[in-house]
Image: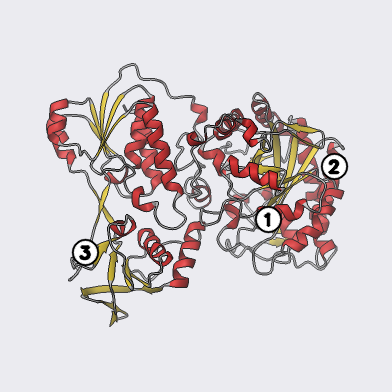
Amino acid sequence: MAGELKHLFSPIRINKLNLKNRAVMPPMATSYCNADSTVSDRLVAYQERRAKGGVGLIITEVCAIDLKGKGFHRELGVYNDDFIPGLKKIPQAVHKYGAKSALQLHHAGRETMKAVIGADPEAPSAIPNPIFNQPCAAMSLERVQQLVQAYADAAGRAKEAGFDAVEVHAAHGYLPGQFLSPFSNQREDAYGGSDENRARFFIEILHAIRKKVGPDFCLLVRVSASEEVKGGYGLPFMEWLAPRLVSAGADAIHVSVGVISSPGLVTVSSADMDQGFNLHRARAIKRIVRVPVIGVGRINDPRFADQAIARGDADLISFGRQHLTDPDFLKKAERGDFEDIKFCLACNNGCIERLAIEMKSVTCTINPECGLEYKGPAKKTEKPKRIFIAGAGPAGLESALVASERGHKVTVFEREKEAGGQLRSASRPPHKELYWTWVNWMMRSLQKLEVEINLGKELTEKMIASAKPDLVVLASGAQPTTPETPGIDGPNVKDARDVLLGKVEIKSPAVVLGAGYVGMETADFLIERGIKVTVVEMKTYMPVPRLTAHGYWLNYRVEKSAAVLLGAVVKRIVPNAVIYEKDGKEGRIEPVELVVTALGAASEKGMASALQKLQIPFYVVGDAKQPRRLLEAVHEAFELADKF
């Protein structure tokens, strides 16, 4: 089947480096290293697992070339020789499976915090990042030269540690990119002002590295082809710069997009952006350079990647978050088992947001094994149990999967005629379709394991009393809640989930009560179908945060096409109108043909008391425990395996 993806699975040479295929795992920060920035067993096992999956080149996560260049606490270091013994473990592990390993050289510049580096960040100019608003200091000419040498020394250490290449991270607004951009560089010396001056720091870094490592060692650069931010540079500047980077020693150009401040977080795009949305920029760079170009941009499907290479968009394709979700997706694609691939949802909850917002190490929403590879494979049970699972939503499906894989006899009961739980409706709004691919993947996986799944059959106390299972998992989910507002039980008032599932005839104009994710995504769903929408929210601010990629685009679409009332409390619903109070004054929305409630949910665990009475052990997981995200449902269910 590899012949069907002959472009992706063909070898390629970069300088003297031979890669077995065109698939790249790009750098993704994990926070897996030790507290002292040295390589941990956890990080090595994670990298080795991805190499085992068949990728041609793995570029490590960011690795600080200077102590003041760290972007977060547990960032890898390469700023002195003491790091070399630990760093050696990465290429040694990756090489076992025929993959090559590159170390990414990184300095955050102003994209860090004093709490991380113990001092004000350094930057081309004393202009704080508008997101962090952390004061920073302009670098002296002496400091500029020190860092040029620090990049070169770091590259030398990488070569000594056995890496096959290094990549200079100049994308996403990090230090070399800060020098390139008028958005962050307002110097008036030899490193600011003109295009040539702003490029000088980056060019000098490449010359210094090449001098340090010699002509045959592979040197990659990662750039943002366009910063996509007001005051930043655009694609024409990178088209001018790219040939100069090659002349300075770059063997390949890794073409990304955006900076941390870019609207919609295009650097870590959600499913609101099309797969391969950035490839046209890679193609533009490829037209003007004679070295390989690596394309990236929310690409999760090997078939799409193969077509992109065939079209000439890029010579290699980076699959980032897809490697977190399914380390074996390339092997599956090579043998033609595309239905067996678990596709990344681009939700960012387990990776980007977990690291940047929650300050935790990276995982994957639908692959809870990500980051736990160092623990080794789960062991089969020596005492198989008969386990009943109430509910075939995310928590129930994951519970069934891990229990069955460990050798237990599992039976699933679901009162609805379709599995998926809350994802049945949550996968219906625009750009949420990927969630349903995961449900289908789970169902196929359970069928292969011969798990008995009873759809349209609710687990009852009588059934449990008769069958006497060894254990019950309550994954019964949650049900919508509604306040005791006059008129809320009227014939034109419907729950958001029923609207999304097509159980309701949608009419215009409509009012959506609640601006959380369910309400906003339902509004998005209605807008896409031409419905005039008003969203009413009692909070005085939008509950869906704009600082996440999906949150930004969801707010953007809804606010562009619908009226949004914040700080408005619904007092009553009458035929054809919604009456609310805002700022102490009564308001009225009319005419209204449809009122949609999206006002929260309450856990459903009514079976708990029956199980206690029957003295049958049980666990409560997912929304049945407390309504939360998909990540919590899946990971709670996965962790149950140790208790079975």
* Residue indicated by mark 3: 483
Q: Amino acid at mark 2?
A: Arg
Residue 338 picture location, percent across and down: 52, 36
Residue occupying image coordinates x 84% and y 62%: 197
* Residue indicated by mark 2: 210
Quadrant for the N terminus in the image: top right
Residue 330 picture location, percent across and down: 58, 34
Q: Amino acid at mark 3?
A: Pro
Residue 570 picture location, percent across and down: 26, 73
Q: Nearer the viewer, mark 3 or mark 2?
A: 3
Q: For residue 280, which numbered disc appears in the image?
A: 1
With 585 as the anchor, is 104 left or right in this view?
right
Question: SS for tag 1?
Answer: helix
Quadrant for the C terminus in the image: top left
Looking at this rendering, what residue extends furthest in the bottom direction? 585
Question: SS for tag 2?
Answer: helix
Task: Give whichever of discs 3 and 2 has the lower sequence position.
Answer: 2
State the residue in front, 633 or 455.
455
| Quadrant in the rendering for residue 470 | top left
